[in-house]
């Protein structure tokens, strides 16, 4: 249940808030897509920790690039 709530919140952000800002994510997939995949795959605990770590790395000092959600 918590997983579905978090996924809905991320989707809400993607559809209503994300279009208001210019694209600036240095990674592929985008940070919000990464969050959706991480929470769906690992649940709210580990999924949110992975998402937070990803967002911390998404800054001008990191080169970015392809960074998929880990498999296990």
Image: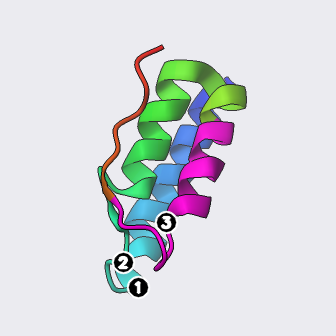
Residue placed at 62% from the left, 49% from the top? 53
Residue 56 relative to residue 8: left or right: right
The quarter of the rendered structure image containing the N terminus is: top right
Instruction: Identify residue for label 1.
Output: 21
Scheme by which the image is coloured:
rainbow
Secondary element type, mark 2? loop
Residue 69 is situated, as x and y percent measured from the top left of the image, at 41, 33
Q: Position of residue 72 (x, y in %)?
A: 48, 13
Going from N to C along the chain, the mark reached first, 3 or 1, is 1
Residue 58 circle label: 3
Q: Which residue is mark 2?
A: 24
Are the residues flagged by discs 1 and 2 in contact, CB closer than 8 Å?
A: yes
49 drawn magenta: yes
Q: Which residues are magenta?
A: 48-64
Q: Nearer the viewer, residue 32 or 64?
A: 64
- Based on the picture, tell me whether residue 34 belongs to the magenta stretch: no
Write down the quadrant of residue 63 in the picture. bottom left
Q: How far apart, in angstroms, are the residues tagged by discs 1 and 2? A: 8 Å
Q: Name the side, left or right, on which 63 lies relative to 53.
A: left
Q: Residues within 10 Å of mark 3 (few under 14, many from 20)?
A: some
Closer to the eye: label 3 or 1? 3
What residue is shown at x 48% (from left), y 21% (from top)?
A: 41
Q: Is residue 2 visible?
A: no
Residue 25's quadrant in the figure? bottom left
Give the Cα distance between marks 3 and 1.
Answer: 15 Å
Residue 13: where, in percent of width, then height?
A: 50, 63
């Amino acid at each position: 249940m918590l997983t579905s709530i978090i996924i809905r919140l991320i989707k809400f952000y993607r559809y209503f808030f994300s279009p208001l800002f210019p694209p600036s994510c240095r990674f592929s997939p985008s940070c919000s897509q990464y969050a959706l995949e991480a929470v769906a795959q690992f649940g709210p605990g580990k999924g949110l920790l992975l998402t937070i770590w990803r967002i911390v790395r998404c800054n001008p000092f990191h080169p970015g690039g392809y960074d998929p959600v880990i498999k296990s």
